[in-house]
Image (cartoon, coloured by chain):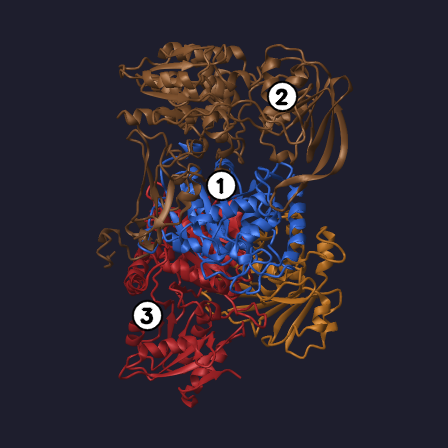
């Protein structure tokens, strides 16, 4: 089973991102589950969402305490929220950041940090604004490539159900980030 | 689904395992809750009770509404032989008692009586079935005499009426001005009466004591209904030039006599005073009525009073003529004093208030009998002669009563003329009915009235008459109007209309005795009595 | 010990849905004529999705957007009384507000289905999973079905209509707030034709019809009232049988088999863990790990709480050493509500196991497999006479 | 027949209303106008008892007893069910007392009015909780004795203006009526029957025990309420204004109405003048 945690801010779409990812896994013929940290939604406040992926039906419903991979949708969150808490040894942390990965050497956990300026990818495709780039699609593109959870085409297929607007731009951003992710794979 | 067991009252098939009710509550005999129960009663209408003649007004109006005009006429004339006349001049005690009075307007029984009476001018009275073989002499052809004559003649009695004047009618002819009762109408009505009933009418025949003795010899009974003599003069006023008695004045004016002078004072508050004043106005004179009490206390009919004021008659209230003196030029000088009212309502002469000089002074303050025959067991009396000055209705009633007494004495007992003892009255119940003020007969405008003896009040059209007659509630009689049924919260009222008259039946098994049926019956025919 | 891996029968659509949306699809397939609801977290997705279905014409129902939960259930009361299939959904405070009407609907013996997204009751405010809301309503006369997964929520709605219309006892279908309602997972959406065959159009009996007038729920004297309540109680007893048959028929037609009490790994288990709702999935994981460590533990998953399947439970408990009851609702001063229920069911049982009362979670407090494992492993140290609250 | 009232009865004898009850009489005639294609929804109120104990019923039209606060919501459900069954011609009538309307049922009432639910809501207002033994409701008028206002309801409070509350919802039909003024009553029910949308009829309904009057005077006293202007017969016009449908036929002072009832026994003479002024002003506003 692969367990994923996505950190974001209220309104950024962490929950949608978790749903797209799990749905793409479902389309790929696997068992998946996504759920948010539950609570009242407040714009800007830190939120988290989870995805579980397995080849068998998933019974477990507790919050993801030991993620295999973590996605961080806002660079600042990596400094204020314990994004690596409980991460499996050597687990992947993708941070939407214009800083190099070494910037995050302060993480105490044993993990592999990867940074990518996903916001810039989103803005380059006209998704959102400088104050709130809509980074769901490119984030998932990079994250899926880095984790190998789901093939690119399933992710593209999953997109329209959740992001019906600006589909072309989202798909293009997703593919660009996927390609960028490929370069980051060590 | 299995059925459950309940009372044997309910068919088991109606019982479910869940709360479904299919059985009517009629099985609950809620009638056992009541303390009192309604009953239907036949009662006398208040108008009939108020009518000295006891005319069952609702009865003949109902016939009229049903389109049975002849039946209505005969039903009415069986009690009142002069409806065309009384319809014009009767004070209508009935209207004052009418249940509708405060709701919208009392039923215009007078106008309707006149309507049916006018129709009856050309309809003969039914010929009596058979002659009795005995006879009656009636002295006086006023309303009392004619009522007695009509009742007797209708029963087959041979009647001869003696009238001292040249024409019949008594007070109806000489006491009531033509603008209220045209002479021609009166004449036609009496003609129809005496001719169709075969009454012998002898005019210009005054009856004295000697003749009375003869009449007693010839007839089974004699009825003395000669009316009264002239009005007395008030204290402090002597006879003299320019001083008239009310009736005498009316008679002279009616005969076309032109009285000297412009300004007249009339003492009194009754109809005679009003009649005198209004007749004077019609002769181009100024008339001032001087009355010792307030306007509401005047015995004259309110309508007459109002019309008099409209026509320009002046009324001085609370005033007493303490003295009258003849002065130069045949004029009369009056000392007017304030009337002092005692706590008991009596009036005495107070301080001087004014002096008035008039060309004529009319005393219209009551009449006195001018003949005192010796009593005899077959001599009966009626009318004003019997009871003093009163209304035409009371005179008619007296005449009729005397006739019935004669018939009774000869073994021809007649059913009583009055209805059941209880009087129906529940005007409060009318509140649910929309007011329906009805039609007033046309009236001559007062400017035109002032110079004419033309009849002031016009007739109702046939349509108006039907409409107005339909307003009669028929108090005391169930008409199946349905209000009791409507207002019963327990559906315990059933109106059975199969018989001649509707019968209200009560479902005492369900009637809770609330009394809303009784409270809502405008005819007052439902009473609540203790439930036993 | 995993939950069913549904075999894919023909005429199903495999989908990935939120638990709430699964409920909405279940409702859509049952074709209620009237839906009435008031929004409350975490039930809102259900009525939002139903609103969209109505707007799009996928669900040709009258949707009454009322001003309170009391009116939501009251509108259903009216609709069902007037002879149609109706639906409502709520949660927590909303369910509590409905309390009076829940009694009325049940006492009227109206066939009605509602879904409750289990959530804590205040004060203080808390919007997370907790069964205090529905378990507080267990004496209202409704049949109560609890589900573990989105699939069970969807299937539960369909089964509930069959049961309620057969018994004239209303059915409350529970899914956990957030854990159940907001989790997206794969499931099968049955083909509408298949559901139509299983659940034919509603044929009302004894309803408000001017052609056959009758009065419903009139004031009732003590004797009659007693009889009616006896009838209601009997219907609840019949519910076991009706539910078994309904589950069986559902299994035959749809390929998913359910039971009032479902078990896993119980054959040789000395220790049983009793759980309800979405928590059960996490319990399965914990028990799997324990069994691999040689701990003889098995799962009892309670789907039916009213009527309480006491005879099945007694049978399943026979010969066991201990049973640990995981509660997400407390009766203060008496312990976990399900524990009391189970103790009452076992009363007088000769060889009853020790019954351990554990208050495992309230107001959404997270439960990890490790939590369960620890409770089971340390059960020997626990006194059956005390309620255990996790540290 | 009188006022063209049908002889068909939809209220059975043997119902459990007190003698002279305005609510039972009102129901009888309301149903005569509305006819057999009517479904009645009834929350807790006197009528819960009047309607007869299980398994009997006082109505020969369908009747649903519902909890106190839910008349308007249940009626909404019944109406929607009828819509889906294609029985739009059936009239749904919620029939509630003042407690179920002015107080506990107000929220559901407001909700149904806001949704423009297509049914007729009738409040038979007897101005207190009569079914439970005469306790004050917000419909109880100033000065009235109840068991919970032993000295008379405070003049500072008075009666809640339900008409204004309903008027603010702009219902399809809004009138007052009383069976004591039958022609107006019948006409308004007939009009309400023809309308579509949310309709509200406020009935003043006499309660002989609660008003402390003789049962046979119940309608006469109620007419005094109309004639004194205490209960004006009004109708909302197209512009949303309330207008008199009947001028008081025989105007009387408010004192006449109050003094006819035992429940106003504690009202002092000096209280009458401000009361009269308030009534006059309100009446004038409807002209």
Give the mark toward the camera: 1 or 3: 1
- Residue D173: x %, y % from top left: 55, 40
Which chain is in red here?
A: C
Instruction: Estimate how packed mark 2 is, as few (under 14), some (14 to 19) or many (20 or more) residues with alpha carbons within 10 Å.
Output: many
- Give me the C-alpha separation between circle 1 and circle 3: 70 Å
Residue B529 visible (yes or no): yes
Q: Viewed as shown, does residue A169 lie left or right of C282?
A: right
Task: Identify which residue, C284 or A141, lies in the foreground.
Answer: C284
**Residue farthest toward the front in the current orientation of the protein:** B210
Q: Circle 3 marks a residue in which chain?
A: C
Q: Viewed as shown, does residue B450 lie left or right of B371?
A: right
Residue at the image position 29 percent from the left and 27 percent from the top: B409
Label 2 SS: helix
Give the mark toward the camera: 1 or 2: 2
Q: Circle 2 marks a residue in which chain?
A: B
Which chain is in orange here?
A: A
Q: Which residue is mark 2?
A: B276
Label 1 SS: helix
- Give me the C-alpha separation between circle 1 and circle 2: 40 Å
Task: Identify which residue, B520 or B269, lies in the foreground.
Answer: B269
Q: Label for residue B428?
A: 1
Q: Quadrant of residue D132?
A: bottom left
State the hue of chain B.
brown
Give the mark toward the camera: 3 or 2: 2
């Amino acid at each position: 089973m692969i367990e994923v945690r996505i950190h974001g801010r209220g309104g950024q779409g962490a929950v949608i991102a978790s749903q797209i990812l799990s749905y793409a896994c479902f389309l790929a013929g696997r068992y998946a589950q996504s759920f948010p940290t539950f609570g009242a939604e407040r714009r800007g406040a830190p939120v988290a969402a989870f995805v579980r992926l397995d080849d068998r039906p998933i019974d477990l419903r507790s919050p993801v305490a030991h993620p295999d991979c973590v996605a961080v949708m806002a660079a600042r969150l990596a400094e204020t929220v314990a994004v690596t808490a409980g991460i499996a040894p050597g687990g992947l942390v993708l941070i939407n950041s214009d800083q190099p990965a070494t910037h995050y050497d302060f993480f105490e956990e044993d993990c592999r940090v990867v940074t990518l300026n996903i916001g810039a990818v989103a803005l380059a495709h006209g998704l959102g604004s400088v104050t709130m780039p809509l980074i769901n699609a490119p984030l998932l593109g990079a994250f899926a490539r880095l984790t190998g959870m789901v093939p690119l085409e399933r992710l593209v297929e999953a997109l329209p159900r959740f992001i019906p607007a600006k589909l072309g731009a989202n798909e293009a951003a997703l593919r660009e980030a996927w390609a960028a992710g490929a370069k980051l794979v060590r | 689904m299995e059925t459950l067991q309940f009372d044997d009252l309910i068919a088991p098939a109606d019982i479910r395992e869940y709360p479904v009710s299919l059985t009517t509550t009629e099985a609950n005999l809620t009638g056992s809750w009541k303390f009192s129960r309604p009953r239907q009663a036949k009662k006398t209408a208040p108008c009939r009770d108020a009518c000295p003649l006891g005319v069952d007004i609702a009865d003949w109006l109902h016939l009229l509404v049903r389109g049975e005009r002849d039946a209505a006429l005969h039903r009415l004339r069986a009690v009142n032989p002069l409806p065309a006349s009384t319809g014009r001049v009767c004070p209508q005690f009935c209207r004052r008692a009418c249940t509708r009075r405060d709701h919208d307007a009392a039923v215009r029984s007078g106008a309707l009586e006149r309507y049916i009476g006018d129709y009856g001018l050309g309809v003969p009275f039914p010929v009596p079935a058979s002659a009795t073989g005995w006879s009656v002499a009636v002295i006086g052809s006023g309303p009392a005499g004619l009522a007695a004559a009509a009742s007797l003649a209708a029963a087959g009695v041979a009647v001869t009426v003696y009238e001292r004047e040249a024409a019949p009618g008594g007070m109806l002819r000489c006491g009531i001005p033509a603008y209220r009762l045209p002479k021609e109408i009166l004449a036609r009505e009496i003609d129809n009466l005496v001719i169709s009933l075969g009454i012998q009418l002898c005019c210009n025949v005054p009856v004295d004591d000697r003749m009375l003795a003869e009449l007693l010899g010839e007839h089974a009974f004699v009825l003395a209904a000669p009316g009264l003599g002239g009005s007395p003069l008030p204290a402090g006023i002597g006879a003299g030039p320019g001083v008239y008695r009310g009736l005498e004045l009316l008679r002279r004016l009616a005969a076309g006599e032109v009285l000297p002078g412009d300004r007249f004072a009339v003492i009194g508050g009754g109809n005679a005073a009003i009649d005198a004043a209004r007749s004077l106005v019609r002769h181009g004179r100024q008339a001032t009525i001087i009355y010792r009490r307030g306007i509401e206390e005047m015995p004259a009919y309110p309508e007459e009073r109002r019309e008099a004021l409209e026509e320009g008659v002046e009324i001085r209230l609370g005033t007493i003529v303490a003295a009258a003196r003849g002065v130069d030029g045949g004029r009369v000088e009056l000392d007017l004093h304030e009337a002092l009212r005692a706590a008991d309502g009596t009036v005495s002469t107070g301080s001087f208030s004014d002096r008035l000089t008039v060309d004529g002074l009319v005393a219209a303050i009551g009449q006195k009998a001018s003949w005192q025959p010796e009593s005899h067991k077959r001599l009966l009396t009626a009318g004003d002669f019997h009871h003093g000055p009163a209304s035409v209705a009371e005179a008619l009633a007296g005449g009729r009563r005397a006739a019935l007494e004669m018939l009774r004495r000869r073994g021809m007992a007649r059913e009583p003329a009055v209805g059941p003892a209880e009087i129906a009255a529940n005007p409060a119940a009318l509140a649910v009915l929309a007011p329906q003020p009805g039609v007033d007969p046309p009236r001559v405008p007062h400017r035109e009235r002032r110079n004419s003896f033309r009849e002031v009040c016009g007739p109702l059209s046939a349509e108006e008459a039907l409409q107005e007659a339909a307003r009669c509630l028929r108090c005391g009689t169930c008409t199946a109007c349905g209000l009791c049924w409507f207002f019963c919260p327990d559906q315990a009222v059933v109106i059975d209309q199969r018989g001649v008259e509707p019968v209200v039946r009560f479902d005492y098994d369900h009637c809770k005795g609330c009394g809303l049926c009784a409270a809502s019956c405008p005819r007052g025919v439902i009473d609540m009595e203790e439930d036993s | 010990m995993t939950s069913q891996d549904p075999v894919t029968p023909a005429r199903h659509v495999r989908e990935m849905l939120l638990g709430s949306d699964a409920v909405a699809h279940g409702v859509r397939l049952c074709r209620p004529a009237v839906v009435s609801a008031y929004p409350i977290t975490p039930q809102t997705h259900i009525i939002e999705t139903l609103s969209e279905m109505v707007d799009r014409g996928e669900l040709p129902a009258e949707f009454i957007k009322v001003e309170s939960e009391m009116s939501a259930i009251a509108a259903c009361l009216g609709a069902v009384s007037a002879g149609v299939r109706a639906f409502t959904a709520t949660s927590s405070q909303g369910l509590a507000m409905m309390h009076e009407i829940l009694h009325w609907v049940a006492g009227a013996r109206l066939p009605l289905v509602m879904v409750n997204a289990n959530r804590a009751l205040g004060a203080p405010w808390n919007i997370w999973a907790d069964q205090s809301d529905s378990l507080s309503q267990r004496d209202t006369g409704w049949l109560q079905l609890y589900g573990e997964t989105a699939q069970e929520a969807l299937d539960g709605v369909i089964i509930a209509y069959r049961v309620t219309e057969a018994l004239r006892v209303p059915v409350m279908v529970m899914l956990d707030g957030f854990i159940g309602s907001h989790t997206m997972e794969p499931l099968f959406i049955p083909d509408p034709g298949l559901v139509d065959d299983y659940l034919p159009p509603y044929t009302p009996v004894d309803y408000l019809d001017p052609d056959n007038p009758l009065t419903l729920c009139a004031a009732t004297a003590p004797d009659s009232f007693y009889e009616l309540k006896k009838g209601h109680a009997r219907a609840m007893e019949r519910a076991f049988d009706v539910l078994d048959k309904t589950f069986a028929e559902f299994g035959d037609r749809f390929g998913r088999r359910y039971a009032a009490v479902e078990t896993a790994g119980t054959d040789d288990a000395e220790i049983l863990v009793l759980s309800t709702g979405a928590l059960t999935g996490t319990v399965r994981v914990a028990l799997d790990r324990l069994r691999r460590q040689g701990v003889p533990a098995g799962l009892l998953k309670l789907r039916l709480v009213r009527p309480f399947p006491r005879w099945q439970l007694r049978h399943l408990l026979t010969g066991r050493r201990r049973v640990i009851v995981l509660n997400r609702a407390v009766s203060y001063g008496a312990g976990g509500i399900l524990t009391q229920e189970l103790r009452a069911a076992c009363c007088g049982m000769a060889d009853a196991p020790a019954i351990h009362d554990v208050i495992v979670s309230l107001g959404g407090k997270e439960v990890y497999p490790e939590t369960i494992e620890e409770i089971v492993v340390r059960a020997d140290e626990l006194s059956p006479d005390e309620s255990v609250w996790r540290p | 027949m009188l006022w063209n009232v049908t002889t068909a009865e939809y209220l059975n004898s043997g119902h459990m209303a007190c003698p002279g009850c305005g609510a039972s009489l009102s129901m009888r005639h309301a149903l005569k106008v509305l006819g057999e294609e009517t479904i009645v929804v009834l929350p807790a109120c006197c009528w819960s008892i009047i309607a007869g104990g299980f398994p009997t019923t006082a109505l020969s039209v369908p009747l649903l007893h519902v909890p106190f606060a839910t008349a308007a919501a249940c009626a909404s459900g019944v109406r929607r069910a009828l819509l889906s069954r294609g029985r739009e011609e059936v009239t749904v009538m919620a029939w509630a007392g003042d407690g179920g309307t002015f107080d506990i049922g107000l929220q559901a009432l407001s909700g149904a009015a806001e949704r423009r639910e297509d049914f007729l809501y009738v409040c038979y207002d007897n101005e207190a909780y009569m079914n439970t033994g005469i306790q004050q409701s917000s419909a109880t008028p100033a000065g009235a004795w109840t068991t919970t206002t032993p000295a008379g309801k405070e003049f500072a409070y008075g009666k809640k203006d339900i008409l204004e509350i309903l008027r603010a919802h702009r219902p399809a039909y809004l009138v007052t009526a009383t069976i004591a003024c039958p022609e107006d009553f019948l006409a308004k029910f007939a009009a309400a029957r023809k309308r579509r949308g949310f309709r509200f009829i406020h009935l003043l309904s006499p309660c002989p025990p609660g008003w402390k009057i003789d049962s046979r005077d119940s309608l006469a006293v109620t007419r005094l309420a109309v004639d004194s202007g205490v209960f004006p017969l009004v109708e909302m016009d197209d512009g949303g204004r309330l207008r008199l449908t009947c001028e008081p036929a025989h105007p009387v002072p408010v004192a006449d109405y109050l003094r006819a009832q035992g429940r106003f026994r504690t009202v002092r003479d000096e209280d009458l003048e401000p009361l009269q002024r308030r009534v006059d002003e309100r009446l004038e506003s409807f002209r």
